[in-house]
Amino acid sequence: MHNSLRRLKTDYVDLHQFHRFDPEVQLDESVRAIDELIKQGKVLYWGVSEWPAHEISRVAAVARAMNANPPVSNQPSYSMLNRRVEDGVLDATRAEGMGNVVFSPLAQGVLSGKYLPGQPPPVGTRGADDKSNMFMGGVLRDEVLTRVQELKAFAENELGVSVAAFALAWCLRRPEVSSVIIGATKPEQVDANAQAAGLAFGDDVWAKADSILGFAKSNA
């Protein structure tokens, strides 16, 4: 940590995240180490990333038992196409008063609508790069891309917003989500994505989006 701060040319970091749960490290050791860094003023707040719900609850309990600074944030992958954290993780963070700063809210760019079914990924995109698209197989299927194009038409033609901004607003609609991490490569993408912060839609709109993407809830 000390060498990292020196390389960053700073005295402290605002937020330190523990990425991926490590079953070989005792939770009390992790809590004690980060708490000491906070006391030294080298870290202001800490959190976890991609931890399962029960481990989030457990580490928060360990911090309380040690009278140490508790985690304040979680950084999970979350998007309209990846909703795994809705099965427990968001509940756990809400119970512990932790915010979620989600990454890959556009499903690695698929929810921007730039990938078309039946066509190869555009040159220069993540999907066209074999070194970086190794985790995109599930979202680059024609079935998914077709649904995303339908979502794009719905967002643009009926709501007057870009599908990317709509997808970001979908994440931000949850009170457990504090912010989204975007990976823009152009200034205009940043401007377009920032519009999501001011978007709010009713339950009927979100239900329509769920139906388009195949996540419609059964009434049975």
Image (tube, grey):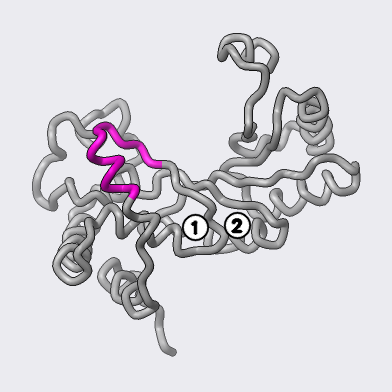
Disc number placed over residue 84 in the picture, else none: 1
Q: Position of residue 209 (x, y in %)?
A: 30, 70
Which residue sits at x=25%, y=41%? 189
The furthest residue to the right: 66
The furthest residue to the left: 119
Q: On the picture, is 138 further left or further right than 15?
A: left
Q: Is residue 186 magenta?
A: yes
Q: Secondary structure at mark 1?
A: helix
Q: On the picture, is 169 further left or further right than 177?
A: left
**Is residue 151 or residue 168 the one in the foreground?**
168
Which residue sits at x=26%, y=29%? 130
Figure quadrant of the C terminus: bottom left
Q: Secondary structure at mark 2?
A: helix
Q: Which residue is mark 2?
A: 89
Figure quadrant of the N terminus: top right
Classify 23 as above or below 216: above
Give the magenta-colored segment's residue range. Answer: 182-194
How busy is the neighbourhood of tag 1: few (under 14 within 10 Å), some, or many (20 plus)?
few
Q: On the picture, is 177 further left or further right than 16?
A: left
**Amino acid at pointer 1:** Arg
- Disc 2 to disc 1, C-alpha distance: 8 Å
Classify 1 as above or below 217: above
**Is residue 156 or residue 77 the one in the foreground?**
156
Classify 65 as above or below 186: below
**Is residue 204 or residue 85 the one in the foreground?**
204
Disc number placed over residue 102 in the picture, else none: none
**Total numbered labels:** 2
How busy is the neighbourhood of tag 2: few (under 14 within 10 Å), some, or many (20 plus)?
many
Q: On the picture, is 168 further left or further right than 83?
A: left
**Amino acid at pointer 2:** Val
Cβ–Cβ below 8 Å for labels 2 and 1?
Answer: yes
